Amino acid sequence: MREIVLDTETTGLDPINGDRLVEIGCVEVVNHIATGEIYHQYVNPKRDMPAGAFAVHGLSAEFLLGHPVFKDVVDDFLKFIGDDPLVIHNAAFDMGFINAELRRLKRRELPMTQSVDTVRMARRKFPGAPASLDALCRRFDIDNSSRTYHGALLDAELLAEVYLELRGGRQPGLSLAAAEAGAVGNAFGEEGDTPAPQAEARPARPHAASAEERAAHEVFIATLKQPMWLGDAETTANK
């Protein structure tokens, strides 16, 4: 199952009043495990950078001036995400900015049903506990020491690890089984091509009744009055 873990950085909090996307980071996961395939793009917002937003992500208007506008990257972005689920921390925020950019270009908006909100997942799993990305990294012992600024790709990579834990975490038994299978395969010269183990043969068990068992059976039969099978035999004989 392919999913895209996605994060954005922006010039502010309100796309309706002119705030714009400035960075998109996406990490491909298959069966909840990151594959190493990513999409990362800085976007020129064609406007100034408020001090508050700069303090969050450290992206200046001067730096972004050298990058393409959203119109020039939208096709590559949409091709990468496809119709697969988008795993987002506070999905309404990022989806709101992406759809505002798509509306400006008169492009089809992404449906909210395509998103998976990890904030909601965390609040259901840990009611009353902090649900920020930093708090979840601490809870799951995920190293986020390089996160001095918010960055779309870095945050998407961290969220991919958090998402795996929210879904139940890596199963140690599967990893151990895979390692053992590889070790046995290498011993035979072909990784993963392990012969099936041979079951130990057991001697056949005796089924014939002993003389004592037959004698006990005859004694028991003698105690029966008009057994059904004798009556059938007499009827057959009279025909």
Image (tube, rainbow, N blue to C red):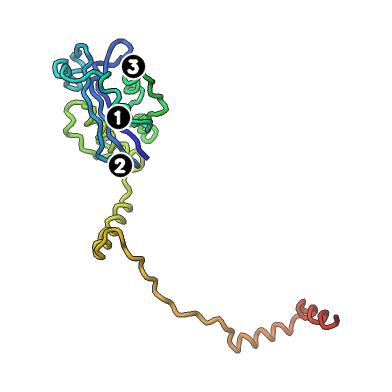
Asked which secondary structure carries label 1, the reply is strand
Which disc, if any, is residue 33? 2
Compare residues 233 and 215 and report the one nearer the observer. Answer: 233
When asked about the image quadrant of residue 164, the answer is top left
Q: Given the image, on which type of amino acid does mark 1 rest?
A: Leu
Which residue shows up at 38% across the image and 20% down it? 108
Which residue shows up at 31% across the image and 63% down it? 194
Give coordinates of residue 92: x percent, y percent. Answer: 36, 22
Q: Given the image, on which type of amino acid does mark 3 rest?
A: Ala
The residue that label 3 is drawn on is: 100
From this viewpoint, which residue is outermost toward the top?
A: 17
* Residue 3 visible to the viewer: yes
Give coordinates of residue 157: x percent, y percent. Answer: 25, 34
Quadrant location, the C terminus: bottom right
Pointer 1 with pointer 2, Cβ within 8 A: no
Which residue shows up at 31% across the image and 19% down it? 97
When asked about the image quadrant of residue 41, the answer is top left
The residue that label 1 is drawn on is: 6
Compare residues 73 and 136 and report the one nearer the observer. Answer: 73
Q: Residues within 10 Å of mark 2 (few under 14, many from 20)?
A: some
> What is the spatial separation of the Cα atoms under label 1 and label 2, in whole angstroms?
14 Å
> What is the spatial separation of the Cα atoms under label 1 and label 3, in whole angstroms?
16 Å
Q: Is residue 161 above or below residue 93?
A: below
> What is the spatial separation of the Cα atoms under label 2 and label 3, in whole angstroms?
30 Å
